[in-house]
Image (cartoon, grey):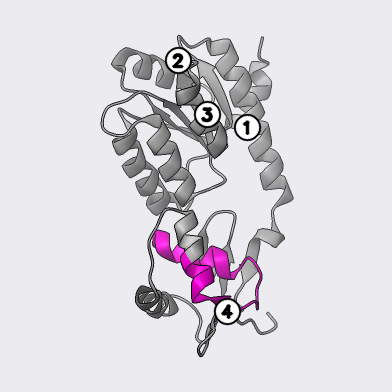
């Protein structure tokens, strides 16, 4: 049996998005989850879930802590939803529900790095056990935090690599998906020059296309959101982040 008090201790400040096309299962599961988590939202398929995922970030300057999703759903299934979410936030905790144990469904998700499978029909004791482990994992991550994840760009601006977020003091500055990918690359090794080839290859890794002309357009727009001269262009070579002492 899961220790309910312990689960509440770790989960009470966390948020969950539950994705399931079966109405009664979705309703009953959300009702149960609200006993443990401060915010519980639901979606009927992967398409609606992705919209809610992005909207939650825009409204809260952070992503849902935990995603629980079925595999087989209309419009966008659980595999495609997982791919899309990991493109946006590679550290997202995702728990997959499945009535199938066929490797053609499970292997793509294992390779993507999901947190856990739970077989349907749901054993809620098993689900609560997995949620306790996931909540503890998130707590440990927060407790480490995380100066190493936050790159100070100047005395006011910082980029948080863990949250994919740009801040001006305490104000979150909205970044597009392409801008986030670019900032993640340049802050991986501050001061290193990344060539156009490096940048194009990095976007290919996220299944996105970006050519040299659009790199320049992207950087032009991104510079308007950043401190002056933070992104340096090295003619004929590439780009890098340049920091003064902050």
Gap in Å between the C-alphas at discs 3 and 4? Answer: 37 Å
Mark 1 or 3, nearer chain start = 3
Which picture quadrant has residue 24? top left
On the image, the x and y values in percent for residue 206 come to 46, 54
**Residue carrying label 4:** 240
Mark 1 or 2, nearer chain start = 2
**Residue carrying label 1:** 135
On the image, the x and y values in percent for residue 130 come to 61, 22
Gap in Å between the C-alphas at discs 1 and 4? Answer: 36 Å
Gap in Å between the C-alphas at discs 2 and 4? Answer: 46 Å
Instruction: Name the front one of labels 3 and 4.
Output: 3
Residue 13 shows up from this direction: no
The answer to whether 8 is drawn above or below residue 63 in the figure is above
Instruction: Name the front one of labels 3 and 2.
Output: 3
On the image, the x and y values in percent for residue 155 come to 61, 78
Residue 198 shows up from this direction: yes
Q: Which secondary structure, mark 3?
A: helix
- Highlighted range, magenta: 176-200
Q: Are marks 1 and 4 in contact (CB under 8 Å)?
A: no
Instruction: Name the front one of labels 1 and 2.
Output: 2
> Which disc number belongs to residue 100?
2
Instruction: Name the front one of labels 1 and 3.
Output: 3
Mark 2 or 4, nearer chain start = 2
Gap in Å between the C-alphas at discs 1 and 2? Answer: 26 Å
């Amino acid at each position: 049996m899961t220790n309910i008090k312990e689960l509440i201790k770790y989960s009470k400040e966390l948020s969950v998005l539950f994705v399931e096309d079966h109405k009664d299962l979705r309703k009953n599961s959300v009702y149960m989850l609200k006993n443990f988590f401060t915010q519980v939202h639901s979606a009927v398929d992967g398409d609606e879930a992705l919209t809610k995922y992005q909207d939650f970030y825009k409204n809260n300057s952070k992503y849902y802590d935990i995603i629980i999703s079925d595999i087989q759903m209309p419009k966008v299934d659980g595999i495609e939803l997982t791919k899309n979410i990991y493109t946006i936030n590679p550290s997202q905790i995702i728990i997959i529900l499945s009535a199938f144990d066929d490797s053609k469904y499970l292997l793509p998700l294992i390779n993507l790095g999901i947190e856990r499978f739970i077989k349907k029909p749901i054993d809620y004791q098993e689900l609560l056990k997995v949620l306790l482990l996931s909540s503890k994992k998130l707590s440990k991550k927060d407790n480490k935090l995380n100066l190493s994840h936050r790159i100070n760009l100047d005395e006011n601006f910082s980029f948080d690599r863990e949250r994919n977020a740009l801040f001006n003091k305490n104000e979150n500055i909205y970044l597009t998906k392409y801008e986030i990918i670019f900032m993640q690359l340049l802050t991986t090794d501050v001061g290193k020059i990344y060539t156009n080839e490096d940048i194009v290859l990095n976007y290919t890794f996220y299944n996105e296309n970006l050519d040299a002309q659009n790199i320049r357009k992207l950087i032009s727009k991104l510079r308007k959101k950043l401190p002056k001269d933070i992104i340096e262009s090295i003619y004929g070579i590439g780009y890098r982040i340049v920091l003064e002492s902050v």
